[in-house]
Amino acid sequence: MSEPVYFAAVPRLKWSLWLLPALACRGPFPQSTLDPRSDFSAAIDGLFTNIFWWALFVFVVVESLLVYAIIRYRARPGAPEPKPLHGHTALEIGWTLAPALILVFIAVPTIRTIFATAGHAPPSALRVEVIGHQWWWEFRYPSLGITTANELHLPVHTPIQLDLSSADIIHSFWVPRLGGKRDLTPGHVTRIAFRSDSAGEYLGQCAEFCGVSHANMRLRVFVQPEAEFQAWVAGQQPASGPAAAGGDARVPEGRQEFVRNGCIACHTIAELPQARGVLGPNLSRVGSRTTIAGGLFANTADNLRRWIHNAPAVKPGALMPPSLLPDSELDALVAYLQSLK
Ligand code: HEC
Ligand SMILES: [Cu+2]
């Protein structure tokens, strides 16, 4: 299966960018926490940079003193023993106070960042409920009547509040350039509030080991200009008419297969009254997504066919049973799902 190339969030040191301009192209690091695109991640990045410089300062001072002492007081033939130093009050006060002060300079911004990234969004914020499932993400927009999976669309320049919870075990929401990590816990709602001022596509990842396909529990966030976001919202509305109108002649047959093969037990499709299952992703507009299966595969006919035929064979542990349907039925199902845009 064709699979997009991902890179783990590599914690690079910023100065390595200055030393190696060749690396300055940030393209290959789509999950770098050091390339923030929201107020939340900028706060974390700022704190990191701050602490990095303090650490560098301490390193340089300590190592310089060490190297100086090693050279200056090394054993030389005929040289007298260096005089040991005891009870130098000024020195002792100095080397107690200096680290204490440095710790204060680190602690104060750290605590401020913790509070800044733990706050609520303003009441005007767009609220999205994020529900972690083994091994996919559900996104519900209560104010817009939309439920979708694995691809989160958000308007740019708008305060966002994500209410995080889990349908099964603990997961963790992490889109390094926007926000996180924050745990999704069953029976408890945690939250992340942020605002992004740069439209773009951001990759994320479940960051809490949650079973076999933990590494295949990815997500994409599309931060879009207002008009683009509104167009997406309009397209997702069940009210915008049966999505499956027109198009492929096999669509009606696919709709029947969807009912006949028990897909309706686990999936909801707005235009299909029998399909009200909630164990799997909402498929009302599955055709409009760029990927399926927790961001694992491009949403192509081939990948859909293989997925429906035997999901656990392409995504280890996937909680969708193999259908092992013959090609003709798979084709009809794929035509139907692709028509749901
Ligand atoms: C027992 C419940 C169950 C049944 C029955 C089931 N599915 Fe699924 N389906 C799931 C789960 C769970 C996922 C998410 C798996 C993952 O990503 O790890 C899923 C994912 C999908 C996806 C990918 C959606 C996305 O956006 O990622 C499609 C398409 C799909 N199912 C189609 C079907 C079809 C067609 C059938 C009937 C032949 C079917 N399913 C039957 C549980 C089920
Ligand atoms: Cu997870």
Image (cartoon, helix red, strand yellow):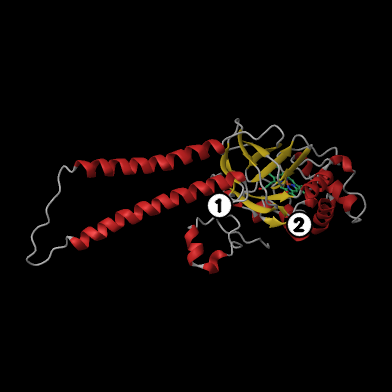
Quadrant in which the N terminus is drawn: bottom right
**Lower sequence index among marks 2 and 1:** 1
Q: Which residue is mark 2?
A: 305
Query: Residue 303: x and y, percent?
Result: 73, 58
Task: Please name the residue shown 33% across and 43% down the image.
Answer: 99
User: Ligand 2 closer than 8 Å to the CB at disc 1?
Assistant: no
Q: Secondary structure at mark 1?
A: loop
Q: Secondary structure at mark 2?
A: helix
Query: Residue 159: x and y, percent?
Result: 68, 40
For the residue pair 50 and 16, the one nearer the viewer reads as 50
How many numbered circles are shown? 2
Task: Please name the residue shown 59% across and 44% down the image.
Answer: 40
Crowdedness of circle 1 by 10 Å Cα count: few (<14), some, many (20+)?
A: many
Mark in front: 2 vs 1: 1
User: Ligand 1 closer than 8 Å to the CB at disc 2?
Assistant: no
Q: Is residue 211 visible?
A: no
Q: Which residue is mark 1?
A: 33
Find residue 61 and report its image quarter.
bottom left
Task: Please name the residue shown 61% across and 62% down the image.
Answer: 27
Crowdedness of circle 2 by 10 Å Cα count: few (<14), some, many (20+)?
A: many
Asked if residue 229 is positioned above or below residue 119 in the image, the reply reads below
Say which mark, if any, is on residue 102: none
**Distance between mark 2 and mark 1 Cα atoms:** 35 Å
Residue sitting farthest toward the top: 187
Residue type beneath disc 2: Arg
Left or right placement of residue 104 versus residue 10 in this view: left
